[in-house]
Amino acid sequence: MSKKEIVKKKYDMPLQDAAERAKSFTEVALGYDMETAVLEAERCLQCKKPFCIEGCPVNVPIPDFIKLILEQDFAQAASIIKEKNSLPAICGRVCPQESQCEKHCILGKKHEPVAIGRLERFVADWEMQNTPELKNPSIPVIDQKVAIIGSGPSGLTCAADLAKLGYKVTVFEALHTPGGVLVYGIPEFRLPKSIVAQEIDKIKELGVEIRVNSVVGQLWTIDELMQEEGFAAVYICTGAGLPYFMDIPGENLNGVYSANEFLTRVNLMKAYQFPKHLTPINVGERVAVIGGGNVAMDSARTALRLGVDNSYIIYRRSEKELPARLEEIEHAIEEGVEFKLLTSPIEILGDEEGRVTAIVCQNYELGEPDVSGRRTPIPIDNSTYTMEVDSVIMAIGQGPNPLIPASTPDLKVNKRGNILTNVAGLTSIPGVFAGGDVVSGAATVILAMGAGKKAAESIDEYLKGLRN
Amino acid sequence: MFKILRKEVLANKINLFDIKAPYIAKKAKPGQFVIVRTDDYGERIPLTIADFDREAGFITIILQEIGRSTYDMGKLEVGDFFLDVVGPLGKPSVIQKYGRAICIGGGVGVAPIYPITRALQAAGNHVISILGANSSATFFGEKMLKAVSDELYITTNDGTYGEKGLVTDVLKRIISNDDIDIVFAIGPLGMMEAVSKVTSLKRIKTVVSLNPIMLDGTGMCGACRVEVGNEKKFACVDGPEFDGHLVDWENAKQRARMFEKQEKVALTQSCNCHSKGEGCNV
Ligand SMILES: Cc1cc2nc3c(=O)[nH]c(=O)nc-3n(C[C@H](O)[C@H](O)[C@H](O)COP(=O)(O)OP(=O)(O)OC[C@H]3O[C@@H](n4cnc5c(N)ncnc54)[C@H](O)[C@@H]3O)c2cc1C
Ligand code: SF4
Ligand code: FES
């Protein structure tokens, strides 16, 4: 191959026009077409020692699938991605590639890295549209049942892997729709629910039973699942769904939502189609979102789509420290989200009816780096000011849901309530494994999936042991 | 899908449903609730479990048509289905031998007070029930409660049935010459607040069951938060029962009005009675 000119930048992702999309819930990023995907694939240097793979928490064979794109063998590309990642259409859309695979891409040293996430999405979408689902080769049935608690990315991955090995898998989900954060948290315009539904259908085709409306801890304890319902192993992946509040005055005013409540109303319950869908939402004209992560960006961008005049992000640190995916920050800015950085609220004010009217903020500056390496925000004296807003959305983080630990006395948790496990994902109870956000604290889709994969291997080992 | 096995109209706009839900019936305890959704467009509506039959595998819910969703539910008949029923949610009531107990049910609150009353009596308490309603048209539950109470009092605001007055009138009378160990009160916020005020004077332990706006019912959204003893509590997982003397009633009443406007919109959009000139409760 003769040496070619290096294309320094990623091929652009076609996007819906910013002004248009800020009014609609349809997907923002439209995806590469075949021609662009092949051009982008040409940028890959096919390194002998591919660092990108090390950056991927599940070690997708990145150069290999990119080479297959070049050869236009998209079906094969999809198949080798799926050996490592059972939900590529989702990861291609929501992984923070800039801090994972693309961060390690050699091209990125001088130029922009290969657009690995976009290529992964292209392959996954191509497969969804083009290949009829291959009927699974008949798998030997193993007569042992596994219960998976929670149907987020961690549970779905673990379920798929165990079903492929022949186990009888039942997923218990508290909500009426499976998917976890993928359906109740991440908005339609970033991750269409039809994509999640298709991925879930494929997992059901493997023979996995998904039981919605089933709150473990209330309907069955872990012990009952194992002793009475006959499950030989359990995987707990209930996520980090407990919303934190700031404990500032005014947080119980009408118009103050946790991001979970706000996003669940809009995404899962489709309040943006009220009153066709009966779940209401009421944010008024000006919304302040507190926090700087993905959850905050999703909330601020969702608020815009509900038609507010102003959607503010209020964050204690500076732009550099915003923990959200880079792409989400860029999209938020393009769409008109207003950033109030180095600012934190100290009180929410309301009228005599108890409705939010304003938020009192204080300015911050950055001090020395703390243990995590992030510079500590320090409040500046006499810098408070009041901003008129009609609603406030708290997106300052979430903890693990206490329902299962509360009903499972032998299950060891740390002081934040995260379930403790060993490297294999085993908890303090034999046969009971845990992973995803409930163990790690709020993290990412791909890490939750990685934990699900790991757990599937450990559970298989454990059950093999029981069989022998 | 959860099939309706029986429907009974108990009073004006108050319906009882037996719903096939064997797993929930097996686990349900007094004080717990379910969240119900009629169809894909419906809200998730929390409803207290009014009764359960573990053998036959059904639970009973009693609902009053007050908003659009309960109005839609009221139209369902035997053989129809609820799309989703999830539960049992919340913590069960603490049932033990207290001694002399008063159980107060106001309005549709008579439904959830029933299993608690029954359990308290079974646990060996002397149970005095006080039931209240606006008028005879909306009153129900006398026979049910009579069977599980040692004493029973009935009040209506307009005097069309039982004593004219409020449940608190009877309550005051009883506690002025009887030693009472515990009071359970379920009903409209105003009633539970009034009961708690009355009992606080004599420091009688009072348990109320709060029904704030809810969404998931599993502690995931915080919509149901209430201030109890100056702490944020999530009613769906920390409750729904709380110490009535510690509840911030003003805040609870304010939060109940969160979607007042939207609720009106949803209701008017559903009923044709306005255009047809028929009266409805909007
Ligand atoms: C708004 C938002 C945006 C995000 N954006 C991104 C992003 O762009 N990229 C990224 O990588 N990550 C993102 N994340 C983080 C990512 O979604 C999570 O890390 C991931 O979903 C965790 O997966 P999980 O399977 O551990 O748990 P979850 O997805 O939280 O799923 C847990 C499931 O368990 C169920 N459950 C809980 N308790 C019980 C019980 N007792 N019985 C039965 N079921 C129960 C819950 O209902 C839920 O469905 C985002 C998170 C949020 C909230
Ligand atoms: S799964 Fe995520 S980290 Fe791995 S290659 Fe795909 S986009 Fe990169
Ligand atoms: S209803 Fe969502 S936390 Fe209670």
Image: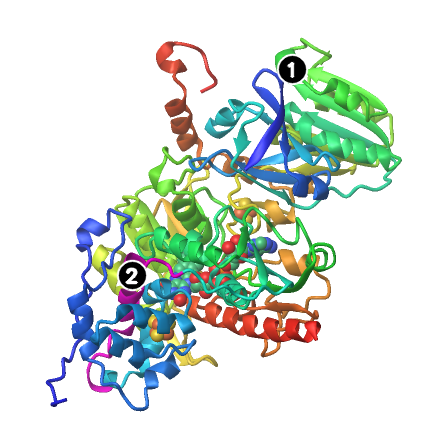
Q: Is mark 1 on a helix, strand or loop?
A: loop
Q: Name the residue under label 1.
A: B157
Left or right of B160? Residue A20 is left
Query: Residue at image x 38%, y 41%?
Result: A271
Q: Residue B158, image x and y in percent?
A: 64, 11
Q: Nearer the viewer, residue A380 or A439?
A: A439
Q: Quadrant of the C terminus of chain A?
A: bottom right
Left or right of A358? Residue A308 is left
Q: Is residue A146 above or below residue B85?
A: below
Residue A412 visible to the viewer: yes
Alpha carbon distance from label 1 to label 2: 64 Å
Q: Ligand 2 is in which quadrant of the figure?
A: bottom left
Q: Residue A125 carries which label?
A: 2
Q: In this view, does A457 lie above or below B196?
A: below
Query: Residue at image x 27%, y 44%?
Result: A307
For the magenta stretch, what is the residue range?
A: A109-134
Query: Residue at image x 73%, y 13%?
Result: B163
Q: Residue B183, image x and y in percent?
A: 77, 34
Q: In this view, does B65 lie above or below A361?
A: above
The mark tally for this picture is 2
Magenta stretch containing residue A110, yes or no? yes
Q: Mark 1 lies on which chain?
A: B
